[in-house]
Amino acid sequence: MRRELLLLLAAVLAVDALFVAGYFVFHLAAAGNPAKIGYTAAWTIVTLMVVLRALTRIRALRGRVRPLR
């Protein structure tokens, strides 16, 4: 389960790095508000998809792992 948590962290950091780089590559600082809002919405949706997928896997693992006694 710890491995899955680290993969979740790495995936979120990778998504953030890609979107921050994209912000500069596509010159969104000079873009209009609709472009910025759309970019932010896409960033949020992609991050949400990554997190939900990882948390689903973690939850499945929690059901299989027996607690220590």
Image (cartoon, rainbow, N blue to C red):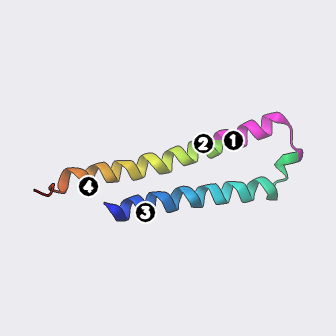
Q: Bin the neighbour count of mark 4 within 10 Å (Cα to Cα): few under 14, some 14-19, many 20 and up.
A: few
Q: Is residue 62 above or below residue 34?
A: below
Q: Tell me whether the residue at label 2 lies in contact with that at label 1, contact meaning CB atoms closer than 8 angstroms.
A: yes
| Identity, as a three-letter code, of the amino acid under mark 1 | Thr
CA distance for labels 2 and 4: 26 Å
Q: Which is nearer the N-term, disc 2 or disc 4? A: 2
| Identity, as a three-letter code, of the amino acid under mark 2 | Thr
Q: Which is nearer the N-term, disc 1 or disc 3? A: 3
| Identity, as a three-letter code, of the amino acid under mark 3 | Leu
Residue labelled with disc 1: 40
Kindly state the secondary structure of the residue where label 4 is placed: helix
Residue labelled with disc 2: 44
In-front residue for pair 63/2? 2
Q: Which is nearer the N-term, disc 3 or disc 2? A: 3
Residue labelled with disc 4: 61
Name which residue lies at 73% across and 59% down: 21
The segment highlighted magenta reads 30-41
Tell me the mark number nearer the camera, choosing from 4 and 3: 3
